[in-house]
Image (tube, coloured by chain):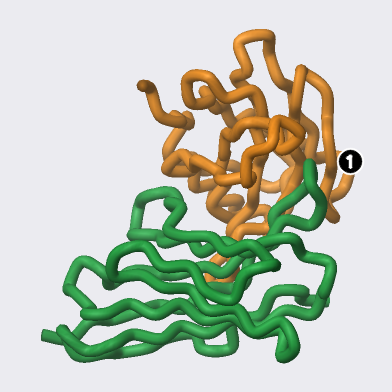
Amino acid sequence: ETGVTQSPTHLIKTRGQQVTLRCSSQSGHNTVSWYQQALGQGPQFIFQYYREEENGRGNFPPRFSGLQFPNYSSELNVNALELDDSALYLCASSLHLGAGNTGELFFGEGSRLTVL
Amino acid sequence: DQQVKQNSPSLSVQEGRISILNCDYTNSMFDYFLWYKKYPAEGPTFLISISSIKDKNEDGRFTVFLNKSAKHLSLHIVPSQPGDSAVYFCAAPMNRDDKIIFGKGTRLHILP
């Protein structure tokens, strides 16, 4: 069974640039969620993808966007980067809650983004 | 508005003793609660959960207690071991197919 993998693990960008983060979900999982974890905070929900469509969004501006592909892998795109976007970005895969599971998330190691 | 609150940023416990991590919540509609554990440079991993219709769930050294009237839950680890040193997050799903809300976490240090 393959776990959740994210790339890149670390990256540095400057204000105004754009970034794409990638995630491969755990085998058998059809739902991918993205979280932002700022220093000293808990993970904050960005959005979730199920069946290649956005299925719930947190309090993040439209410059945060995503994709899910037919193989359930996903991308997080952030445009017009700001200094406050510096954080650990976590991808989590799961089975859709409608299938009767308890919503346990399986997280990747994260992509640490630094915006200068 | 934080719906899941962990008011203790850190906790130090002697090895072999009991660790108690606390969590408060404001939304009485949560169906269940989860605890996640996070080591440095790793993603959070699921530890234990409890349904809102129960008041206790036990899994080995880990027990979670839920007090719905007080909107409070706690994670007990006994006996505490060095490998338990990590950040622990309390979490709850907002809806059946929606976001999971995390607390800010409590860093647990197990002292030798």
Which residue does the numbered mark 1 point to in the structure image?
A62
Pinpoint residue A102: horizontal percent, then vertical percent: 62, 46
Seen in the picture, residue B104 relative to A23 is either above or below; the reply is below
- Which residue is painted at 56% across and 46% down in the image? A104
- Front residue of this view, candidates B6 and B79: B79
Seen in the picture, residue B64 relative to A96 is either above or below; the reply is below
Few, some or many residues within 10 Å of mark 1 (<14, 14–19, 20+): few
Q: In the rendered view, does B89 fall on the left or right side of A33?
A: left
Pinpoint residue A79: horizontal percent, then vertical percent: 77, 36
Residue A18 appears anywhere in the view: no
Seen in the picture, residue B35 relative to A107 is either above or below; the reply is below
- Which residue is painted at 39% across and 80% down in the image? B76
Q: Residue furthest left?
A: B112
Q: Quadrant of the N terminus of chain A?
A: top left
Query: Judging from the image, what is the letter of the chain drawn in orange?
Result: A
Helix, strand or loop for disc 1: loop
- Front residue of this view, candidates B22 and A78: B22
Pinpoint residue A74: horizontal percent, then vertical percent: 64, 23
Name chain B's colour. green
Q: How many marks?
A: 1
Q: Chain of mark 1?
A: A
